[in-house]
Image: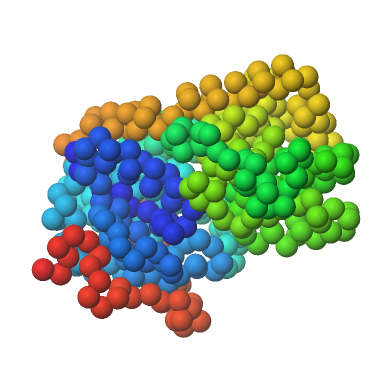
């Protein structure tokens, strides 16, 4: 089967969607399927890529990880024609997602859409953020989903929310699985020493983008309480983002700057070693659709303390592999984490085994098999929105035109970020021939 995956974010970015696309693509290829990824051009992207089409784009739009794709030229359609996909899989409902609609329509292919993100919680990256915009974003993603043949939801919570919002297209739950081997047998001692953390320290950990939507003020307050309670405790934060400064200032103000360790983005073996360096993983985000970093931490045998929210509630079983806290009370969260840290050794070992079991239940081989079965079900169909969705279809097209006019008006200030494909650099196999 040939699968065309179209996404707004991809390497070198290491956010959840980019990692999900890369993980599924690798799993499909390992099973002998063809995968072509269509994504915007980014700064510092790999010099050589196989089976990836890069689209010219405005980089890091308004401080986000997104690149704003420019109008698509015929070279993309030529690359798609040569690839001969059986299914088109869109990972966003706008920008490259709008291109996915055109590709599916032109080649009469089934269109699958993964609703990775609750977009209304990220509108602060867009100029003019307001309640009206947030309602519009929900309507846009819902209308897009109803134009597709099948919708993947990364968790039960998201699937239920989509149906409640009016998505009539069939919705199936397909989480991003973890490659267990990527997080086993990490060298936590070496990572601790590299970061200046004592070998015998108790390490509270977190990983992810350091951004306001991740509820990091809450997490920082809880971590400060825990670190201040015992002199041997340190807080290891793996990631980067705009909230980095506020987190550092909070620890400095408490006189605990030497026990906060913010690594920036780490990948591959260093990420595996970072998880192995942690005794407990803390997670307070309320905006997730799936808990990829939670699964990764659990694959390293690290119990999790998290707030009860979409993404976390599907993975964290209270008292089995960590603690799951209802409500947003910092004191209760810190107390729950304290209970795990000070539990008898046998209890901590049981939580570790529970974490490993939860990760195994969400391993990539299982989720890739599930996704491929759903592709097979829609394979052979043609992208034909039902008559009742024609108005939504036209509305999407009108919005796409308005979106482009808005972005054109902003493009002057972003001209330096405009990336054109390098001369002579192929964007896809055989492109330009």
Rendered image quadrant of residue 3: top left
Rendered image quadrant of residue 190: top right
Residue 95 screen position, x and y as percent: 39, 60
Residue 66 left/right relative to 187? left
Up-down relation of residue 213 to residue 352 (above or below): below
Residue 348 screen position, x and y as percent: 71, 22
Residue 327 left/right relative to 100? right
Up-down relation of residue 310 to residue 126 (above or below): above
- Of 128 and 262, nearer the camera is 262
The residue depicted at 43 percent of the width and 69 percent of the height is: 43
Residue 195 left/right relative to 273? right
Residue 5 left/right relative to 331? left
The residue depicted at 20 percent of the width and 67 percent of the height is: 75
Please say whether residue 146 is visible from this viewpoint. Answer: no
Residue 193 screen position, x and y as percent: 68, 49
The quadrant of the image that shows the C terminus is: bottom left
The residue depicted at 22 percent of the width and 75 percent of the height is: 424
- Of 302 and 127, nearer the camera is 302
- Of 348 and 60, nearer the camera is 348
Badge count: 0
- Of 191 and 397, nearer the camera is 191
Please say whether residue 140 is visible from this viewpoint. Answer: yes
The residue depicted at 55 percent of the width and 46 percent of the height is: 271
- Residue found at the very far left of the displayed protein: 433
The quadrant of the image that shows the N terminus is: top left
């Amino acid at each position: 089967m040939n699968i065309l995956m179209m996404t707004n974010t991809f390497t070198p970015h290491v956010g959840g969607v980019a990692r999900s696309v890369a993980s599924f693509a690798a799993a499909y290829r390992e099973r002998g399927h063809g995968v072509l990824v269509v994504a915007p051009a980014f700064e510092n992207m790999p010099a050589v890529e196989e089976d990836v089409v890069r689209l010219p784009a405005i980089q890091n739009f308004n401080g986000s990880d997104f690149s704003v794709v420019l109008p698509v030229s015929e070279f993309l359609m030529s690359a798609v024609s040569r690839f001969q996909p059986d299914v088109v899989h869109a990972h966003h409902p706008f920008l490259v997602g709008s291109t996915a609609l055109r590709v599916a329509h032109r080649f009469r292919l089934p269109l699958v859409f993964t609703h990775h993100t609750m977009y209304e919680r990220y509108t602060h990256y867009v100029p003019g953020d307001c309640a009206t915009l947030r309602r519009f974003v929900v309507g846009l993603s819902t209308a897009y989903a109803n134009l597709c043949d099948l919708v993947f939801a990364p968790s039960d919570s998201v699937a239920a929310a989509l149906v409640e919002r009016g998505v009539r297209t069939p919705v199936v739950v397909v989480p991003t699985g973890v490659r267990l081997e990527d997080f086993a047998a990490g060298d936590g001692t070496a990572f601790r020493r590299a970061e200046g953390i004592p070998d015998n320290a108790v390490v509270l950990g977190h990983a992810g983008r350091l951004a306001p939507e991740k509820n990091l003020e809450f997490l920082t307050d809880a971590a400060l309480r825990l670190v201040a309670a015992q002199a041997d405790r340190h807080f290891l934060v793996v990631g980067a983002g705009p909230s980095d400064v506020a987190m550092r200032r909070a620890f400095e103000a408490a006189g605990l700057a030497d026990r906060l360790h913010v690594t920036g983005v780490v990948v591959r073996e260093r990420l595996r070693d970072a998880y192995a360096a942690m005794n407990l993983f803390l997670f307070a985000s309320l905006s997730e659709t799936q808990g990829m970093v939670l699964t990764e931490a659990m694959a390293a045998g690290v119990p999790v303390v998290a707030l009860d929210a979409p993404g976390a509630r599907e993975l964290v079983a209270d008292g089995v592999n960590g603690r799951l806290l209802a409500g947003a009370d910092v004191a209760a969260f810190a107390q729950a984490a304290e209970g795990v840290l000070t539990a008898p050794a046998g209890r901590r070992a049981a939580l570790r085994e529970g974490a490993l079991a939860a990760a195994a239940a969400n391993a990539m081989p299982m989720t890739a098999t599930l996704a491929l079965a759903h592709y097979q079900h829609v394979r052979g169909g043609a992208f034909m929105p039902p008559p009742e969705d024609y108005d939504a279809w036209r509305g999407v097209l009108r919005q796409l035109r308005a979106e482009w006019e808005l972005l054109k008006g902003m493009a002057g200030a972003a001209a330096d970020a405009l990336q054109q494909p390098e001369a002579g650099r192929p964007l896809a196999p055989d492109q330009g021939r």
